[in-house]
Image (cartoon, rainbow, N blue to C red):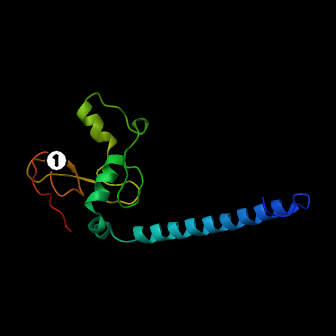
């Protein structure tokens, strides 16, 4: 708006330069983020499981994503044959380990056998402390 008007060339040039600069910066930032995530995934699943915090685990379970790699852990219904039993159907859609990074997501309680999110400190059915390797 405050640039001199030379037939619009100055404004267009400034817009093109700013777009190219911001695009370059965005691409560079995304590449750095991807490299950082790939380095994190090279660490063993036990080490990654130790770093998961309770708040992150709660948010991950609520939004159906792995707390380590951030990808969805629910298998879509069309990827798995549908079984009539509702309890079996629910568990067929959720895997015990992340398909993308291999992190353990669900494990049975030692006391009652109920399937729980592996990164929570207590069982959701009986309240027993979950056995963790942290």
* Residue found at the very far right of the displayed protein: 7
Q: Position of residue 62 (x, y in %)?
A: 32, 47
* Residue found at the very far top of the displayed protein: 84
Give the residue number, with chain letter if any, for mark 1.
124
Up the image or down, 118 lies above or below 78; here it is below
Q: Residues within 10 Å of mark 1 (few under 14, many from 20)?
A: some
In the shown orientation, is residue 22 left or right of residue 97? right
| Residue 104 visible (yes or no) | no
The residue located at (63%, 68%) in the rendering is 25
Up the image or down, 32 lies above or below 89; here it is below
Q: Quadrant of the C terminus?
A: bottom left
Q: In which quarter of the image is the N terminus?
A: bottom right
The residue located at (42%, 53%) in the rendering is 71
Q: Where is residue 118 in the image (x, y as percent from the top left)?
A: 23, 56
Q: Where is residue 38 in the image (x, y as percent from the top left)?
A: 46, 68
In the shown orientation, is residue 113 left or right of residue 50? left
The residue located at (31%, 40%) in the rendering is 92
Query: Considering depth in this image, is 23 or 37 the residue closer to the camera?
Result: 23
Query: Considering depth in this image, is 72 or 57 the residue closer to the camera?
Result: 57
Q: Where is residue 94 in the image (x, y as percent from the top left)?
A: 32, 44
């Amino acid at each position: 708006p405050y640039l001199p008007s030379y037939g619009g060339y100055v404004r267009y040039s400034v817009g093109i330069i700013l777009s190219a600069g911001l695009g370059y910066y965005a691409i560079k930032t995304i590449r750095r983020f991807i490299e950082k995530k790939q380095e994190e995934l090279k660490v063993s699943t036990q080490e990654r499981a130790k770093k998961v915090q309770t708040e992150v685990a709660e948010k991950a379970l609520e939004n159906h994503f792995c707390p380590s790699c951030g990808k969805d852990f629910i298998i879509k219904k069309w990827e798995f044959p549908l079984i009539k039993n509702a309890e079996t159907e629910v568990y067929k859609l959720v895997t015990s380990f992340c398909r993308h990074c291999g992190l353990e997501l669900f494990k049975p309680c030692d006391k009652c056998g109920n399937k729980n999110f592996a990164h929570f400190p207590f069982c959701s059915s009986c309240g027993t402390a979950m056995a963790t390797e942290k």
